[in-house]
Image (cartoon, grey):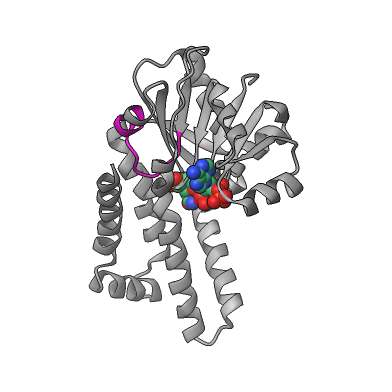
Amino acid sequence: MTDQIAIIGFGNIAKAIITPLLDKKLINPENVYCVVNSEKSYQNINKHYKHSINIYKSSSKASKIIWDCPIKLLSVKPQHLKDIVEVENIKINNKLLVSILAGVSIDRLTQKFPDHKCVRVVTNIPITVGNGLTGIAWGGDLNQDQKEFTKKLFENTSRIYEFTEDYLDIFLALTSSGPAIIALIIEALSDGGLSGGLPKKLSEELVMEMILGTITLIKQNKLTTSELKNLVTSPGGTTISALRVLEKKSIRSALIESIVSASNRSKEFR
Ligand SMILES: NC(=O)c1ccc[n+]([C@@H]2O[C@H](COP(=O)([O-])OP(=O)(O)OC[C@H]3O[C@@H](n4cnc5c(N)ncnc54)[C@H](OP(=O)(O)O)[C@@H]3O)[C@@H](O)[C@H]2O)c1
């Protein structure tokens, strides 16, 4: 990965993507050109970031240098997209812009950055611990090198899935909204433990270890979820009693609808 890369918005997710590549020396810090908005972030990165990358404030003239990089990672919040103004550069051919903005379509990106070939990527928060999931939808006309480079950006910290763009909204709902849904489930189950008299911290620990153990069991033994459910549900026992309550409260329908709703919301952002 020798090309110069510009990072437009060097926040949590961009750092999670780029830092491991710098750590592993897959990118040279001299080739990384980042731009942030506030003085605070600029100073923070300048003083405390562990790699000596090039860092600029968006209001500075010097920041225009990012438009000389053939590859850009766009990682501002969607509401700040309007503040990014493309500078055309006739000296460089085949410019690539990889966007991780939630819900912003390839069409919209291409209209905003007509000098670039655009790729839309959806990744999720576990990418910050190297355990992410990344969905990629290619815009038209990308060459093989550009596709390979894009995949290299994410494959260190996440599993990659390639889709047509239509599937990115549902991918986002499952994988990006999913962690919040799981956190809510963990919190609620822990409150169940709390109601039974367990201390909060212990209750939460038990729930998380139980979830990890359950997933390991399903994966290692190649069980279906129904097989796992049958394995622990004995006639007239405690588990069927718990499941009955959940079915009465329509938990399946609530979870299905939560994913459909997140996907529909993502479509509205386009
Ligand atoms: N958080 C998630 O779970 C998640 C997961 C997947 C994808 N995403 C997507 O990733 C993107 C970034 O999210 P994040 O959580 O990393 O946000 P973040 O930590 O707030 O980072 C946003 C970055 O953009 C910078 N910025 C704002 N305005 C700018 C401008 N005009 N020019 C250049 N830089 C500017 C900010 O600088 P300052 O700090 O100086 O304001 C900051 O460095 C979002 O579009 C989001 O949809 C997020």
Instruction: Name the one closer to the observer, 138 or 134.
Output: 138
Q: Position of residue 129 (x, y in %)?
A: 61, 48
**Magenta-tinted stretch:** 99-110
Which residue corresponds to the image point at 39% horizontal and 71% vertical from the top-left? Answer: 239
> Is residue 264 shown left or right of residue 180?
left
Instruction: State the quadrant of the N terminus.
Output: top right
So how many labels did they put on this image?
0
Q: Position of residue 162 (x, y in %)?
A: 40, 29
Instruction: Name the one closer to the observer, 240 or 86.
Output: 86
- Is residue 114 visible to the viewer in this orientation of the structure? yes
Q: Position of residue 209 (x, y in %)?
A: 57, 63
Instruction: State the quadrant of the C terminus.
Output: top left
Q: Is residue 37 above or below residue 246?
A: above
* Residue 84 lies in the magenta-colored region: no
- Is residue 132 visible to the viewer in this orientation of the structure? no
Which residue corresponds to the image point at 36% horizontal and 31% vertical from the top-left? Answer: 112
Instruction: Name the one closer to the observer, 24 or 63.
Output: 63
Q: Is residue 186 above or below residue 2?
A: below
Q: Is residue 106 above or below residue 269?
A: above
Q: Position of residue 16 (x, y in %)?
A: 60, 43
> Is residue 64 shown left or right of residue 115?
right
* Residue 104 lies in the magenta-colored region: yes
Q: Is residue 210 above or below residue 176?
A: below
Which residue corresponds to the image point at 45% horizontal and 48% vertical from the top-left? Answer: 77
Which residue corresponds to the image point at 27% horizontal and 52% vertical from the top-left? Answer: 265
Residue lying at the far front in this picture: please name it. Answer: 61
